Amino acid sequence: ECAQQTAVPGGEALCVDRDAFGKAMTAAIEGHPNIETIRREVTEIPQERPCIIATGPLTSSALTESIRRLTGTRNLHFFDAIAPSVEADSIDYSKVFRQSRYDKGGEAAYINCPMTREEYEAFIDALLSAKIAHLHLEEEKDPRYFEGCLPIEVMARRGRDTLAHGTMKPVGLINPRTGKRPWAVVQLRQENAEGSVYGLVGFQTQLRPSEQERVFRMIPGLERAKFVRYGAVHRNTYIDSPKVLAPTLEVKVKKTESEESAISALHTSEDSNVKALFFAGQLIGVEGYVESAASGIIAGINAARRAVGREPIVVPKETMIGALLDYVANCPQEDFQPMNSNFGILPPLELECKGKDRKRMKIERARRVMKEFLESLQAEES
């Protein structure tokens, strides 16, 4: 509801005015009769149960240390980047055109900055030679980024045409001035309801602010761009969930006396009260707003069930949220990495099929399994 109220044009994507959305969500929480809002720093995991820890990837150092002591495992991290934004009235509209890819989503929601091959090659040269802002990354010789949100300079180093086939791909777009598809395109998306600020889509970056101005002003239409916000990189913390959490998002309870794992440390840590303690959101190693919100819903349902003496639910892994939580809890890799929703984490189909048919059948299976799961919960209530 808050997202719909604060939506801005975004083609087929649901995009929001982030400031208005934040204010709407805050107002909804503060105005809810069953929610008490307390504004103070939490430095230790609360003793009350049930309890949900959903403090996000920028959890404070003190609480992070409390979590580390409780779980007995090291906290993991990756680096995430944000893209720059520019003032709408600083865009040269004589060099750009409005269109959504394949004209989908109704109203043309994006401003497109077209590039010729020569302009693209010059841009890549400048990008590869640009200086990086080190800041807190100085201790990282080889920073680990989330693959779904790589800085553009990192992608460019993987190959000169990587951006032309990814972030800057021109497919589904026709420049009305030439009647042809550009060699490459930089898309700008409206960021607020007034339409006064536009973000460079997919242009997450670690470049120094002065270098962002120099390099990004090479983009046709942005020669005189005024930057409202520069791109930047920040460190995201997440827990080693496969060693700590069950698919219910509850902290695991030790199964046997001989079990030698991080879970054993849960019962010798300062806070041994782990039953009905849940984690949710990006802190557990899911990536994305929808994924974080979905994990919060499941953690909330299970905390409520624990509060009345009932067992938590495990969402079937044939559904997207079930598959994501199964990955978080049971990822077999030693080097656990954050994950977003994708068809690859869903279990294989019993029948072999390819391409769109495979995706369609996985969707149909997920809907059927979720319907059966919800019906079983309803039967449990009656």
Image (tube, rainbow, N blue to C red):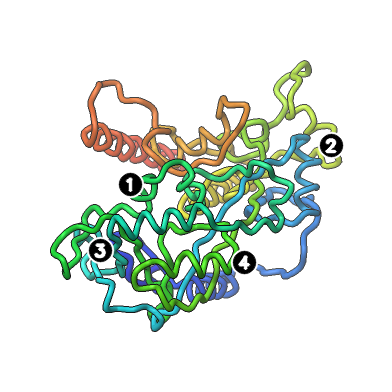
Q: Earlier in the sequence, mark 3 or mark 1?
A: 3
Q: Earlier in the sequence, mark 2 or mark 3?
A: 3
Q: Nearer the viewer, mark 4 or mark 2?
A: 2
Note whether residue 206 is visible: yes
Compare residues 155 and 307 and report the one nearer the observer: 155
Going by the numbered disc 4, the residue's amino acid type is Ile
Going by the numbered disc 1, the residue's amino acid type is His
Count residues near mark 4 (Cα–Cα under 10 Å), then give few for <14, some for 14-19, many for 20+: few
Q: Earlier in the sequence, mark 3 or mark 4?
A: 4
Between marks 4 and 2, how big is the CA–CA gap?
30 Å
Count residues near mark 1 (Cα–Cα under 10 Å), then give few for <14, some for 14-19, many for 20+: few
Q: Which mark is residue 165?
A: 1
Q: Mark 3 — residue?
A: 100
Residue located 39% across and 33% down the image? 344
At mark 1, the secondary structure is: loop
Quadrant location of residue 72? top right
Q: Nearer the viewer, mark 2 or mark 1?
A: 1
- Residue placed furthest toward the left: 179
Q: Position of residue 247 (x, y in %)?
A: 55, 35
Q: Earlier in the sequence, mark 2 or mark 1?
A: 1
Residue located 39% across and 45% down the image? 162
Q: Mark 2 — residue?
A: 269
Q: Nearer the viewer, mark 2 or mark 3?
A: 3
Q: Earlier in the sequence, mark 4 or mark 1?
A: 4
Quadrant location of residue 337? top right
Compare residues 205 and 9 and report the one nearer the observer: 205
Between marks 4 and 1, how big is the CA–CA gap?
47 Å
Q: Position of residue 225 (x, y in %)?
A: 44, 76
Count residues near mark 2 (Cα–Cα under 10 Å), then give few for <14, some for 14-19, many for 20+: some
